[in-house]
Amino acid sequence: MAFWNLKAEGDAVALLADSGATLTYAQLARRADELAGQLPEQPGRTVGFLLFPPTFDAVSLYLGALRSGRHVPLLLPPGIHPALLADLREKYQPDWIATGTEPVQHVRSERAAGAIPIPHESLGLLLSTSGSTGSQKLVRLSYTALEANAESIVEYLRLREDDRAITTLELSYSFGMSILNSHLAAGASVVLTDETLLSRGFWELAQKSHITSLSGVPSQFAMLRRAGLERRGLDSLRMLTQAGGNLSEPLKREFKALSERLGSEFFVMYGQTEAAPRISYVPPARLDEKLGSIGVAVPGGALDLDPATAELIYRGPNVMLGYAESRADLERGDDLQGVLRTGDIGRRDEEGFYFLTGRLKRFIKLSGARVNLDDVEKMLVDELDTPLACVGTDDRLTVVLTDGASVTDAAIREFLRVRCDIYAGLIAVERRGALPFTANGKVDYQALMREMS
Amino acid sequence: MSKPLEDVFSETLGIDRARVVDGLEYNSIKEWDSVAHMALIAALEENYDIMLETEDVIDMSSVGRAREILSKYSVTA
């Protein structure tokens, strides 16, 4: 049974707000259908944008669109940059735009028959692959993929009706979305808040709501440490879950020990938006001995390595239909047939646990968002007209300039903030005599990384 | 010799010094999100050569609150 059917006991609580307000499953189902009624009435399949804040109405609209079986939302962060939104509108020509706070805006009042490509019948949802760098490529997820991944998360986390999560990530981000989906699939509940891990308001709400799980990307685990998780009085906590990039081994060890002291489990997980998103997890009991591992495939899926390149390949019902780069691409059906080439290079140990050893392309994750270093580098070079290189690790983008460059660090930070939505705390700027080059004249990124570490 | 509080905020968040006023609140501008807050905490600790308590980290909800909190550590902010 798909999570959007909201089939838990009618009076069970589904959502809670900062204010203390609650919404039961029955109320949520009613509100979802009511708000879906604001979506275009004319028959046929539509595509819309949902700028997705953590509110009752936005979640209701999201579920309402899925329940309608014909309105396909693209989930976007509520604070999306206007220029980026304009770009997306141009490319995907949405039929409607919703914010969950204002009435749904109908962008197209009448549709010329045949003029606008109609989304494929199996397409349920669209997600963005990264922040604002490079092309605005979307991931096309089927109803089946969404349902399958939510169910498999419920299974390996052993989620129950009395579980309660709290929003720590954007709901438009695949990890954030999957927490909502899986908790609804389990008949459990989710606290919706804008507060962050570094504010007292968040911790008071978490304690008062008796949350049972906390989730985060690597940068947020550093925050949990600074915020003193152990001292926040979370007496119902039963699990911590981590995804969205590699968490350093010292932090993994620290949170493993801390989870044990709190009587909870620590799940280290791996995924990609392209898999709706969960691909693998490390069973908590094995974490100590498999510390650097991404674990084993989630229930219903299978991992493998390309014999030639060692690229990690995932097969499962949660794999996307394919990418989209235009409205016309939304007409496409299942391009991938359940097989996802992850772009990550890996190895497998004798017990079948997988480890990542590199990437085919130069990607890093910044606060969970995938950033293509080559794209960022090209944007900077185009703008500043000076030799430079972008390298990095998860949660740290380093821009390397030569000593002769006249551009200031502040100008680099400003450009990355305005154009790429990357903030100062994630950026380092370094200067050196010259950039290292390989024999065939390309920037030697590996040498740069070696020298920096 | 430590830098003025305003300079630490302005440099770490990448915003104009003129915007660093006591009423400026955490999470109210994109530049001061949780990732930037972590960098800010580290920069303040380095600037004043102190270690902030966890309670102070989660109470530092505005420039004004930061100033109050830092005064407990006997530093001039």
Image (cartoon, coloured by chain):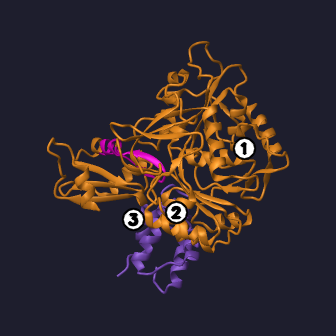
Chain colours: A orange, B purple
| Labels 1 and 3 positioned on one and the same chain | no
User: Which image quarter holds the N terminus of chain A?
Assistant: top right
| Left or right position of A179 against A225 | right
Circle 1: residue type: Asp
Residue assigned mark 1: A57
The residue at the point 75 percent across, 48 percent down is A187
| Left or right position of B1 against A291 | left
Mark whose residue sits in front, 1 or 3: 1
Whether residue A101 is visible here, answered yes or no, is no
* Image mark 3: chain: B
Segment colored magenta: A362-380
Whether residue A182 is visible here, answered yes or no, is yes
* Image mark 2: chain: A
In space, the residues marked 2 and 3 are separated at their CA atoms by 24 Å
The residue at the point 50 percent across, 64 percent down is A288
Circle 2: element type: helix
Circle 1: element type: helix
Q: Is residue A74 highlighted in magenta?
A: no
Residue count near mark 3 (Cα–Cα under 10 Å), binned few <14, some 14–19, many ≥20: some
Q: Is residue A372 highlighted in magenta?
A: yes
Of the pair A276 and A381, the residue shown nearer to us: A276
Circle 3: element type: helix
Residue assigned mark 2: A221
Of the pair A96 and A321, the residue shown nearer to us: A321
* Residue A423 horizontal/vertical position (percent): 43, 55
* Residue B31 horizontal/vertical position (percent): 48, 57
Circle 2: residue type: Phe
